[in-house]
Image (cartoon, rainbow, N blue to C red):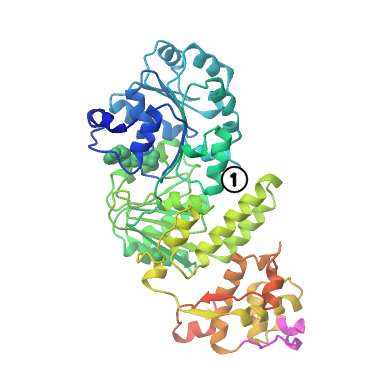
Amino acid sequence: MSADILLPLLKSTFGFDDFRGRQAEVVGRVMAGEHTLAVMPTGAGKSLTYQLPAVALAGCVVVVSPLIALMHDQLRGARAAGIRAASLTSVDADFADTRQAYRDGQLDLLYIAPERATGEGFRALMEARAPALFAIDEAHCVSEWGHDFRPDYRLLRPLLDAFPGVPRLALTATADKHTREDILVQLGIPSKGLVLAGFDRPNIRYRVNPRIGAARQLSAFIAANPGPGIVYCPTRDGTERMADRLAAATGRPVAAYHAGLDAERRAQVQHDFVASEDGIVTATVAFGMGIDKPDVRFVAHAGLPKSIESYYQETGRAGRDGDPAEVLMLWGAEDFARARMRLGELPEARLAGERARLDALAALVETVECRRALLLRHFGEAPPENCGNCDNCLDPPKQVDATVLAQKLLSAIYRTGQTYGAAHIEAVLTGRRDDRIVSRSHDKLSVFGLVEGEEARLIKPLVRTLMAREALAITEHGGLMFGPAGRAVMKGEVPVMIAEPPARRGKRAARGGQ
Ligand code: ADP
Ligand code: ZN
């Protein structure tokens, strides 16, 4: 059925003149009672695809959503639009009233957390009165291939199957091809029920740089971006330290946000940010979900994000108003070392997926080609080769062939027993005869002093690249050792091209120290 007949309702309830992107298609399927998986980027307007049916359909739409904070935001929004909406979560006190209202057919929209939706009580409630639609938000949580697997989501299937006549609408912003297929299978949605919306965010300018001095790099980035922005930091402590340093360096209002702060403080930071025209929040990934601030002008990552999916989702918070926005990711070899270490702690079933995810991230930071093209290909699109709005398109990096240097580097690591850190290996290669080198007779090795002049500048970026590619790994004491791809690189079997590092000037730089 065409969703066009709902246009008057779209206008009267939400004030919108038209559907956006592929909303109409999704709403049409829902109204026709067909199972659907809608994969749409953040900001595309996913909630509307069940909120409008909630108004149009006779029964109640049940929305399974894992994030209570997000749920309550949505609830407020829906109520403001005049929708009779309620939620059943651990923080809701009016349980009995809500259940009664549902039974009496007084609700259009009911939000529920997955752990509750899979319980006996909820099943009984659904049996008392069948819903008009099951909407499953953040549907990637059902897949072990997804980046945020939640076992509770697996238990939803029996509930869904108990109501074969009730259509299912699964929604997610972040699902690669593999995850999408898995969601379809797990939730019993036919493959033709997939509605995949475009992922491109043309107004976002992507930049990815090696981390040299995060606070300094970020201050410069912020100075060029006067509007409001978010700086994601890997740790809670990091958000606080970074807030202090950025405030001092930029003179802008900067607040830290992480899950360790009390609820009142978090609400305050969030509230101030939404109202601000130049505010900055340094945050862990806990920040941003459900924040409706369309004019975020920049998003920066002080360290490697968890996955391409998280990167896309987090950067996607910039420029939702369609005006130009900039994003910057800073990364270091140690980010990959840490991430690869964490892989070791994963159950076997998730290892392959997580490793592939990390490799994809490595490709994104390493590429000398268009970042956007790489991102979009990751999400299954076939973008043009150049976007004209990412660092690599705007200022194509000169490439250098580091294949031979990589062989020298790996030989030096091999010959010194795969125990020394990057600084020592660099000293061996460049022939620096310091005490440590002499005492270990590393100046007698054939690789000693093998790298001269300009080439020495490439050693650090090369270590980062080889780390990202898994040719190098980190020992538990912080030394460099071979990764699974190390041997092939040492034998010169795979070419290693790296981006030419920016030219250094002055005496300090010539020493190459950090
Ligand atoms: P998502 O859940 O996909 O990230 P939301 O549902 O939060 O996105 O919607 C993002 C923003 O787009 C909201 O501010 C919403 O009001 C707005 N929006 C949704 N649909 C439309 C539409 N058809 N026309 C204009 N604005 C819309
Ligand atoms: Zn590009």
Magenta residues?
437-451
Q: From where the camera sits, is residue 76 visible?
A: no
At a point 45% along the width and 19% down the height, the residue shown is 131
At a point 60% along the width and 72% down the height, the residue shown is 463
Q: Position of residue 337 (x, y in %)?
A: 63, 61
Of the residues shown, which amino acid type is indicated by label 1?
Answer: Trp
Q: Position of residue 192 (x, y in %)?
A: 48, 39
Q: State which image quarter holds ligand 2.
A: bottom left
Q: Is residue 240 above or below residue 435?
A: above
Residue 8 drawn in magenta: no
Q: On the rendered image, what quadrant is the N terminus found in?
A: top left
Q: Position of residue 421 (x, y in %)?
A: 67, 72
Q: Quadrant of residue 43?
A: top left
Residue that badge 1 annotates: 145
At a point 70% along the width and 83% down the height, the residue shown is 435
Badge 1: residue crowd in 10 Å (few <14, some 14–19, many ≥20):
many
Q: From where the camera sits, is residue 102 visible?
A: yes
**Secondary element at tag 1:** loop
